[in-house]
Amino acid sequence: MTSTETLTPLQVDRVVKRFGSLTAVAGVSFELGDRECLGLLGPNGAGKSTLIRSIAGRVRPDSGSIHIFGQPALSFKARAALGWIPQDLALYPLLTCRENLHSFGQYQGLRGRTLQDAIQWCLDWAALTDRSDEPVKKLSGGMKRRLNMAAGLIHRPRVVLMDEPTAGVDPQSRNRIFEMIEGLRAEGMSVLYTTHYMEEAERLCDRIAIMDHGSFIALGTKEELVRGAFGGRNDVIMRFSQNGKDAAAWAASRGGAFENDTARFAVDQPSQIAPLLEAAGDQGLELIDLTLRRPNLESVFLQLTGRELRE
Amino acid sequence: MIPAIIRTAFTGLRRDRGALILSFILPVAFFSIFAIVFGGQRGNRTPRISVAIVDEDHSATSQRLVEALKREGALNVLTRPEQKKGAPVPADYTSAGAENAVKQGVAPAALIIPKGFGTNPVAFGSSSSRPVFQLLHDSSDPIAPQMIAGLLQKVVMSSMGDLMADAGAKEFEAIAGGLTPQQRQTVDSRLAQIHRYAQQVDTAPSASSQGNAGGMVNVQERDVVGEKKTNPMISFEAAGIGVMFLLFTASAAGGTLLDEAESGTLDRVLSSRVSMTSLLAGKMAYCTLLAFGELSVMFLWAWAVFHLDLFEHLSGFVVMGLSTAFAVASFGMVLASVAGTRAQQAGISTLLILTMSAIGGSMFPRFLMPEMMRKIGLVTFNAWAIDGFTKVFWRDEPVMNLMPQVAVLLGSGIVLFFVARRFAKRWEYN
C-alpha cells in the first residue's frame, strides 16, 4: 500500500473543459510537488479559474483526470486534503470572524477541541484575533481577504489552491499576505497560486506556468522560462515620443515588438544597441528613453503571447 | 429635461423584463383570480349551501318538505352520509349523526324536522302549538344558517300552499264557527294578530341568531361547534394569516441559497465535505424551524391577547404547526432552486403566495367560495393547513383525525424537496 507521503500532492492529466463552443481548458497536464509553490500566470480569460475550479471539484471536466494524493478530485479524501481560496470573498457578512470559521470548520467535518484549536490557529495566522468577534461586514478589505484565506485553510489541508488572493488589496496588506503564504509553505503545504502580478509569482513561486487560451505555453522556474524564451539575450527597451505607426513598422522590420510607444528588442551583446539607435535616427524617430534589461517574467510573457499580462 | 427622465425610465423598464411583467401581467393575473374567487365563476351565481336534513316525523308532509328543499337551487340537501366506494348505502341522518356532520364540517348546518310536523305543519303567528325545527349550525359560517332559515320559510310558502290553505281553513273554522258575538270578538282578535304578524314581518330583522319563531314554521337555531368558544373566529384568522406569512418567510429564507450562490459562499461550502443534498436538507430544516417558531409566536399572541385556547390543543397545534412549517419550507426551497436570480425569486414568490392565499382561504373563507374554487383551493398548502388548524381549534378533533391534512402537507413537502434537489443540480458543478 502506498503512503500519501510518497504520492504526488496534485496530479492533473490532460484536463479539457468546454463551455459550448469555447474551450476554457484545452488538455492541461502538470504535477504539483510536495511543499512546492507553482504559480499560474495568464491574462483574463486564459482558463486559470476554470482549471482551479476543476481541481476544487466545482467544475466537472469533459475529459482528463485530477488526483490529489492519488485520490480522485471529487472524493471525500481528496476534498479533505485540499483547501480552496476563491477569488471572490466567500464569507457570511453578518457573522463574526469566529462564527465564519466555526461554520466552515464544521462543513469540513471538524468538531470539539480540534475545531476550537483550528479557529484559533486561523485567527492567529490571519492576524485577526483582536477582531475575532467583529462581523465580517465591518472589516476592512484587507482583513476580509485574510479571513477569506483563513476560511479555506481551517481544516489544515496539504494542498492549497489560491485564486488571486491579493486582488484589490493595498500594498501593505499584500505584503502581509505574502508573509502568511510563506508561513504556510514553511509548514509543508503545497500551493497552486494564480495571479496577474509578476512580482508575486517571482517572490512566492518555485515554478511558474504560463497559461493562454486554455493551454500551458510554458512551465518551469523563472530562470528556465527566461532562458527558454531569450537564451542569453537581454531586452533593449526604446521609448519614442511620437510617430507610433512608423515606429511600430520599424520595430517589426527589425524583429522587435512594439506597444504603447515602446519598442522591445532582444540583443545578445550590448554592442548591438548602437546600430539600433542609428537606424531609429535614420527613420526620423525621436527617442526619449532607452533601457537595457535582463528579461523578466513579463518579458517572457510578452514574448510568448504577444500581449501584456494585465490586458 | 422631464421628457428625458421619462424616456430613460421607460427604456430601463423595457430592458428589465421581470419588472415589466410584474408591472403589467401581475395585476391582470390577480384581478382574474380575485374576480373568480369573490365573484363566482359563471353568471355570478351564489354558491349552493350544504344542509344535512333529518326527518324525525317520517310523514308524507315531511317527505314533501324534504323533496321541496331538494328542489331549492340554493341548497345542497344531504339526507345521509356520503356513500363510500364498495360500502352499502348508509342510513339516513339521525339528529346525532347530523350534529356530528356539522361538527366535522361536512355541512355548515343541519335541519331537523320535528315529530308532529305532519299533523300541524304550519301556522300563522307565533303559535306555541307548532312543532319546532332545530337548525344546528357551525358559527364559523355565519351566513349559512340565516340562508337556510330563510329558504325554509320560502319553501314552505311557495311549495306547500295547500298546507297553508288547510291551516287557514282551520284557523277560519276556529275563528268563524258560530259567529256569536263572542266569536266575532275572537275573529277580530285573530285578525288583529295577523295584522300584527304582518307588521312584525315587515319590521323584524331578516334573521335572528335566537331563531325565527314568527315565521310559517318555528325554527330554533343552535351553534353546535362554537358555542363553548371564548373567541370563536380567532383560530381561523391565526391559521389563515399565519400560513400566508409563513410562505413569505420560507421564500425569503430559501432565497439565502441564491444569495450564497451569487456571493460565492455556496461554491466554498460545496467544495467542502457538504453535499448538495445535505445542504438543501439543512436549509430546509432551518426554514421549518423558523416557520414553526413564527407560527408559535403568532398563536401565543392569539392566546395572550385574543384568548385562543392554545394549551388545550397543544398536541394538535404542534402536529399541524410542524407539518405546515415543513410544507412551506419545501416551497421556499423549490422557489430558490428554480429561480435564476434573487429578483426573479422575489417576483415569482409574491405571485404564487398571494394566489395561493387567495384561493386557499387565507384571505377569504373557502366555504364562501364557489364549489369549483373550493376544489381548486385544495392544491394549496393554505387550504390543507387551515382545514387542519380548524379541526384542532374549532372542531376539537383528536390528533388522529389530522391524518389527511398531515399526510398531504408532509407528502407534498417531501415531493417538493426532491424537485428542489433536482433543480439544485445546476449549482453542483458548473
Image: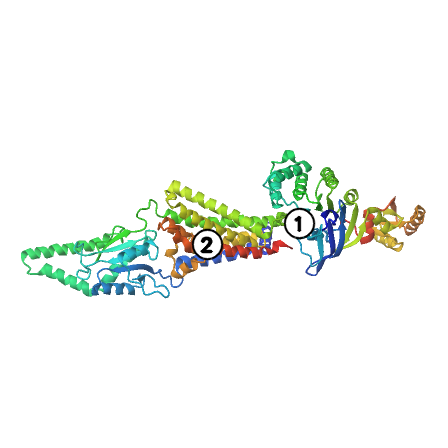
Color encoding of the figure: rainbow
Badge 1, how many Cα within 10 Å: few under 14, some, many 20+? Answer: some
Q: How many marks?
A: 2
| Quadrant showing the C terminus of chain B | bottom right
Mark 1 element type: helix
Name the residue nearer the viewer: B127 or A122. A122
Name the residue nearer the viewer: A38 or A157. A157
The disc label shown at residue B409, or none: 2
- Looking at this rendering, what residue extends furthest in the top direction? A130
- Looking at this rendering, what residue extends furthest in the left direction? B180
Name the residue nearer the viewer: A104 or B334. A104
The picture places residue A45, in percent across and down from the top left corner, at 72, 53
Badge 2, how many Cα within 10 Å: few under 14, some, many 20+? Answer: many
The picture places residue B319, in percent across and down from the top left corner, at 43, 49
Q: Alpha carbon of mark 2 to alpha carbon of mark 1: how far? A: 39 Å
Same chain for labels 2 and 1? Say yes or no: no
Left or right: A181 with respect to A246?
left
Res B175 → quadrant: bottom left
Name the residue nearer the viewer: A33 or B169. A33
Left or right: B182 with respect to B276?
left
The disc label shown at residue B306, or none: none
Q: Tell me what residue is drawn at x 64 percent, y 33 percent.
A: A130
Chain ID of residue with mark 1? A
As shown in the figure, which amino acid type bears the numbered disc 2?
Answer: Leu
Res B131 → quadrant: bottom left
The disc label shown at residue A77, or none: 1
Left or right: B31 with respect to A87?
left
As shown in the figure, which amino acid type bears the numbered disc 1?
Answer: Lys
The picture places residue B280, in percent across and down from the top left corner, at 56, 51
